[in-house]
Image: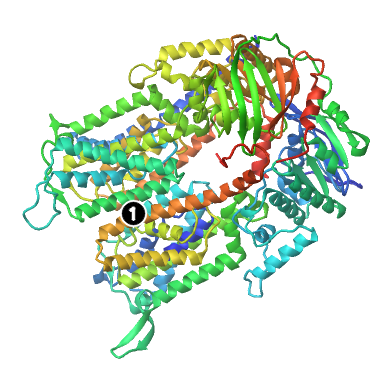
């Protein structure tokens, strides 16, 4: 009898909360649509055109791939600031391995090996995975701060990219390689389709797979995850390896589109990936969020980027705006946590003791 | 100079990653005010004193904002200062015409590139740069502040154990706000030095500096966990860093290797720092285990 | 706020303090008096209300009823700052010091002696600190960093700090837990010397001999009420125990499901610093209880067996097969499950839903192709457990942190049960569980035992253990010192508590 009463009252209590929570969670898409509509009205000729959409999507596709990696790492409660370094290094490395050695002066010198893309692309992936693995080791075995480690890693990776390319650009990637980034089917870029597909797949996997549960558990409560049979160290390392892989994938995509490599490729994208994820509802504390939300963040940032560009806004205003958006996203996240449904549990003596000890 | 600012915040267990942009901003502000119109400035050509004042105000303002966001709004210091990094850098580009502002008056440049002593030699003078002397003095002053003032010691207290510090009656929030303001001030001074040395200000001034600054501080013994390290140590880290900066190019090492080695050195320094602090905390437990009378058949002294 | 001035001779008078939390009445009309220069002991089982009472005294909790009188000022409510100003200081078990700073700095933090120019005068700092320590006869190296001190020294330093802060009443909360006998002597000598100088203490401890060693009077709390306050010389340990345990409401009791088949064997298990000589055989369907003071080693034993911590040396066998678990997952795979004491930290991932928490360890079984979880099968299994254990939740997707304590505990049980363990180690089964749910928990344990699971219950609730266990082992300083059989005349709460308190006086 009492059981039934308790349950129904709980249900009633939580129903209202559920609605509001649903609203907050998907709030971001509302904003995306709103912003899109706003810009469409402002600049119908320039913004609201098919070619422009394609531009937005192109930018979103590369960013999007990186964001998947970042979101996955964020879900485990860590940061990955090295993704753009992976992007940079793998693109430089790829060109170095593939391109024809230059006969003229200027530009960087390729290795002259002219390896086939089928070999080069897997090498790119391996570099990304290796980078992720190293980071994972540093963080789990040596217990270092993920923030600084990935930051330093980014430096190292970019540095190596600089060494190889000597700061110069290299052009002329083989057509076979460019397939992913450059091909369009009836005007619609393949890369965008691939990215969308990736999102759908990853989203599905994260929600339905053991690995997804693993990630979220480790991110939300590492100790409990361990006591429930997971291996947090392995999980975190795997997350970084995936992020590294995706960094290389994004490199493949971008290089294929631009057909040019330069060591400064991807600069600044890291912050964008964090911003997109946070805006999309991925909690910085770990465990909460979805790639779907992160994708909304990606769209939002890409739209804003594009629109500001079209409005001939100083490109560096954009940087400032991005910074503001991040701060805003943080504020929103803080609000979400404030609005927690009522918890129904009794005070326990020992918890009071722990609280006492932390306050005293 | 930025290292000093960083060290201040790191001792309280906070980060300030916005300093490189702050440097750029203050330098740009000065540049715009000082340079003649044909040289890229606003054409105001104010006196150096006014420019310096403006820079200082800018730097302090940045510090105040950072401090406010972190202590009053309780936002994560890492993210906030990174966001500021981006915002400020954006601001630099906005206020500058994109080109450089150059040719500043001598009075302004003195600290950055002027001599403090001219020792007559056989051929001309051997001048000791004012900036070098200044930096050393700055470090010494910082050291005096952190080691010998109540405020300085309170910084360490807050960084070491914020709860215990509050119990001792220390106003932790105020201390944190103040160190950020100090960091902002350091940004202004750094801007002065940079502007003086380069005799120009570009929007890119200071970009990428944040990593070597962090690394220098950590290498110099300032722990990322807070409450540890001295300014003199930081000075040592700064010198080491500068030597590498200057020495490696002289050894004909490619500038790109230098970038990489910076990352590696940072990695190494942080790993060492993490290891050091972890060891310290483990040692106490290990000592207890060694003195115990229970379980002596178990030869392992392990701390999970 | 609310202060009134009253004439008095006591340092502290708490009158009629009552405090209730949702679902639990923690304190009922508690009276506590402390005289100047007195060391007043406060004893009681876990959950008796000691912590809450101190929280009220320190201003961290507001009492629903009652007043607190410190010296001659009476308060009906206080905040922590007022409590501090009034002279109440708290020394927790794990002292909060600024580890990377020196002893001298910790003592004088916030107000360091300076030279004429306003700069810190380190010589004066050290001298002043040394002077203060000398006043209390405490021998420490003031230039040493606190992190380099021994634990006993850190505790003494904390007490000293409190006194320097003009504390009139210092609350010592289980200060001796991490200390060796020699260090305890040192600490007690120090505290006694302070008492001579007029400081007053409240001494909270589970170590009854210590209470008798150092306290002048002692107050016993039970279920939130004061059972009595006595002079230490007018009473002895057995009498004290009777007061702590009391006569009680009807206890739970069950039929034994113990078989003859031995399934779980511990041979000569020892872990440096925590336990030694652990030999145990548990039969199929048997429920064995382990109890002891905090720090007796039972907690580490449980965690070590499960793989959360280092287990030490020695052999463990399940069904004759060697059992080694370096990580919890190994443990699950070999048939051992563990219910942690701190379920918020180790037991459940609060933000995730019930169904996820229940199935974490068995996902491998529910996975179809490429790692995808078979949702329908999962739902079926989780539903079974929700029904079987009577877990109150609106649906499977409810985040577990929204459930009540008792239901959360049931979720943990469900999770462990899914792994079909041969051995189940439970640490404090009814902690944070309301009275109604407690019966359910007992029923679950009974159910699992009758299904053949060998169960070890580590708990400090003696009456509960008597009700559900076939045997109860007492651990003292890392060794199993006594054993009580179900149904034996000697198996009484008083005897068990005595065994817990008695035994060696050696620590560490």
Percent across and percent down for residue C454 are 61, 16
Colour mode of the rendering = rainbow
Towards the viewer: C179 or B154: C179
In the displayed orientation, state which residue is furthest to the right. Answer: C234
Q: In this view, does A223 lie above or below B75?
A: above
Percent across and percent down for residue A190 are 18, 31
Which chain is home to disc 1?
B
Towards the viewer: A249 or C53: A249
Which image quarter: residue C214?
top right
Secondary structure found at label 1: helix
Q: Is residue C165 left or right of residue A243?
A: right
Report the quarter where the C terminus of chain B lies.
top right
Give me the residue at 34% from left, 37% from top: A241
Q: In this view, does C477 lie above or below C200?
A: above
Give me the residue at 77% from left, 37% from top: C205
Residue B33 visible in image: no
Residue C309 visible in image: yes
Q: In this view, does C277 lie to the left or right of C466?
A: left
Q: Is residue A356 above or below residue C195?
A: above
Which image quarter: residue A327?
top left
- For label 1, the residue is B90
Q: How crowded is mark 1: few (under 14 residues within 10 Å), some or many (20 or more)?
A: many
Give me the residue at 50% from left, 14% from top: C382
Q: Is residue B231 above or below residue C343?
A: below
């Amino acid at each position: 009898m009492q059981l039934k009463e308790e349950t129904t009252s709980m249900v009633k209590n939580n129903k209202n909360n559920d609605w509001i929570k649903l609203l907050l969670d998907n709030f971001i898409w509302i904003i995306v649509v709103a912003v899109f509509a706003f810009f469409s009205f402002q600049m119908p000729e320039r913004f609201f055109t098919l070619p422009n959409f394609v531009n937005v999507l192109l930018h979103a596709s590369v960013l999007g791939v990186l964001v998947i990696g970042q979101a996955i790492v964020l879900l485990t409660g860590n940061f990955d600031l090295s993704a753009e370094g992976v992007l940079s290094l793998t693109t430089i490395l790829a060109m170095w391995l593939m391109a024809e050695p230059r006969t003229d002066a200027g530009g960087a010198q390729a290795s002259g090996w002219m390896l086939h893309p089928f070999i080069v692309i897997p090498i790119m992936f391996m570099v990304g995975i290796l980078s992720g693995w190293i980071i994972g080791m540093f963080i789990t075995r040596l217990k270092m701060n993920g923030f600084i480690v990935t930051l330093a890693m980014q430096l190292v990776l970019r540095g190596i990219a600089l060494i190889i390319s000597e700061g110069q650009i290299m052009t002329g990637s083989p057509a076979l390689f460019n397939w992913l980034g450059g091909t369009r089917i009836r005007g619609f870029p393949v890369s965008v389709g691939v990215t969308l597909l990736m999102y759908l797949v990853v989203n599905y996997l994260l929600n339905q797979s053991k690995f997804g549960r693993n990630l979220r558990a480790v991110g939300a409560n590492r100790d409990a995850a361990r006591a429930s049979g997971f291996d947090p160290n392995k999980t975190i390392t795997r997350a970084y390896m995936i992020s590294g892989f995706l960094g290389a994938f994004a490199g493949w995509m971008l290089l294929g589109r631009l057909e040019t490599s330069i060591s400064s490729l991807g600069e600044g994208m890291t912050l964008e990936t964090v911003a997109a994820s946070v805006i999309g509802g991925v909690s910085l504390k770990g465990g909460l969020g979805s790639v779907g939300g992160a994708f909304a963040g990606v769209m939002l940032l890409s739209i804003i980027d594009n629109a500001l560009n079209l409005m001939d806004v100083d490109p560096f205003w954009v940087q400032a705006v991005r910074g503001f958006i991040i701060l805003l996203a943080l504020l929103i996240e803080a609000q979400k946590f404030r609005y927690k449904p009522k918890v129904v549990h009794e005070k326990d003596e020992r918890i009071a003791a722990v609280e006492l000890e932390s306050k005293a | 100079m930025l290292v000093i600012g960083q060290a201040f915040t790191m001792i309280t267990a906070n980060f300030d990653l916005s300093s490189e942009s702050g440097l750029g901003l203050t330098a740009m502000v000065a540049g715009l005010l000082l340079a003649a119109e044909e040289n890229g400035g606003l054409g105001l050509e104010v006196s150096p004193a006014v420019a310096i004042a403006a820079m200082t105000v800018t730097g302090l303002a940045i510090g105040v904002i950072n401090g406010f966001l972190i202590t009053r709004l309780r936002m994560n210091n890492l993210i906030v200062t990174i966001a500021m990094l981006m915002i400020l850098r954006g601001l630099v580009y906005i206020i500058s015409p994109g080109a450089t502002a150059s040719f500043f008056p001598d009075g302004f440049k003195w600290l950055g590139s002027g001599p403090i002593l001219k020792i007559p030699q056989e051929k001309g003078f051997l001048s000791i740069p004012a900036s070098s002397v200044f930096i050393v003095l700055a470090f010494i002053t910082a050291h005096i502040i952190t080691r010998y003032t109540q405020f300085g010691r309170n910084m360490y207290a807050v960084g070491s154990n914020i709860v215990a510090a509050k119990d001792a009656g220390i106003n932790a929030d105020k201390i944190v706000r103040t160190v950020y303001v100090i960091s902002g001030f350091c940004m202004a001074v750094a801007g002065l030095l940079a502007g003086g040395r380069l005799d120009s200000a570009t929007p890119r001034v200071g970009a990428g500096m944040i990593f070597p600054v962090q690394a220098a501080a950590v290498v110099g013994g300032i722990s990322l966990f807070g409450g540890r390290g001295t300014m003199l140590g930081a000075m040592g880290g700064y010198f080491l860093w500068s030597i590498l900066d200057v020495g490696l190019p002289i050894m004909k090492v490619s500038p790109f290797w230098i970038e990489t080695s910076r990352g590696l050195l940072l990695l190494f320094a942080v790993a060492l720092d993490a290891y050091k602090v972890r060891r310290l905390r483990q040692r106490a437990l290990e000592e207890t285990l060694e003195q115990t009378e229970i379980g002596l058949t178990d030869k392992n002294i392990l701390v999970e | 706020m609310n202060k009134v001035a009253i004439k008095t001779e006591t340092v502290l008078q708490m009158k009629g303090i009552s405090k209730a939390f949702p679902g639990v009445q923690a304190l009922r009309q508690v009276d506590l008096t402390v005289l100047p220069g007195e060391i007043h002991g406060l004893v009681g089982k876990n959950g008796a209300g000691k912590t809450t009472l101190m929280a009220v005294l320190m201003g961290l909790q507001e009492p629903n009823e009652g007043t607190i009188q410190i010296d001659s000022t009476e308060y009906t409510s206080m905040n922590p700052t007022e409590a501090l100003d009034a002279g109440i200081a708290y020394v927790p078990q794990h002292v909060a010091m600024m580890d990377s700073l020196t002893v001298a700095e910790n003592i004088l933090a916030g107000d360091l002696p300076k030279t004429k120019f306003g700069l810190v005068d380190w010589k004066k700092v050290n001298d002043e600190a040394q002077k203060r320590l000398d006043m209390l006869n405490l021998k420490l190296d003031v230039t040493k960093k606190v992190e380099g001190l021994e634990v006993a020294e850190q505790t003494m330093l904390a007490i000293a700090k409190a006194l320097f802060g003009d504390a009139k009443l210092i609350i010592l909360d289980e200060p001796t837990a991490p200390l060796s006998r020699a260090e305890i002597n040192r600490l007690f000598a120090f505290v006694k010397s302070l008492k001579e100088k007029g400081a007053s203490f409240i001494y909270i401890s589970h170590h009854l001999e210590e209470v008798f060693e150092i306290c002048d009077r002692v107050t016993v709390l039970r279920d939130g009420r004061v059972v009595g306050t006595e002079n230490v010389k007018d009473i002895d340990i057995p009498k004290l125990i009777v007061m702590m345990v009391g006569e009680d409401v009807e206890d739970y009791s069950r039929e034994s499901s113990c078989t003859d088949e031995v399934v779980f064997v511990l041979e000569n298990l020892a872990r440096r610093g925590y336990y030694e000589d652990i030999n145990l055989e548990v039969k199929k369907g048997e429920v064995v209880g382990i109890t002891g003071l905090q720090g007796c080693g039972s907690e580490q034993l449980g965690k070590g067996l499960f793989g959360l911590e280092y287990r030490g040396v020695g052999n463990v066998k399940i069904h004759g097969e060697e059992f080694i678990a370096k990580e919890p997952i190994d443990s699950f795979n070999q048939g051992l499950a563990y219910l942690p004491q701190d379920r918020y930290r180790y037991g459940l991932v609060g933000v995730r839903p019930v169904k996820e928490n229940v199935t974490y360890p068995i996902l491998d079984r529910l996975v179809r192709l490429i790692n995808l979880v078979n949702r329908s099968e999962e739902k079926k299994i989780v539903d079974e457990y929700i029904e079987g254990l009577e877990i109150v939740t609106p649906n499977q997707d409810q985040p577990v942190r929204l459930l009540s304590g008792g239901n959360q505990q049931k979720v943990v049980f469900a999770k462990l049960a899914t792994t079909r363990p041969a051995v189940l180690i439970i640490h404090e089964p009814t902690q944070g569980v309301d009275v109604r749910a407690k019966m359910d928990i007992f029923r679950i344990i009974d159910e699992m035992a009758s299904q053949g699971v060998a169960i070890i219950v580590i708990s400090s609730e003696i009456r509960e253990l008597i009700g559900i266990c076939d045997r109860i082992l007492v651990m003292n300083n890392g060794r199993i010192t006594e054993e009580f059989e179900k149904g034996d005349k000697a198996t009484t709460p008083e005897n068990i508590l005595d065994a817990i308190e008695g035994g060696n006086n050696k620590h560490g």
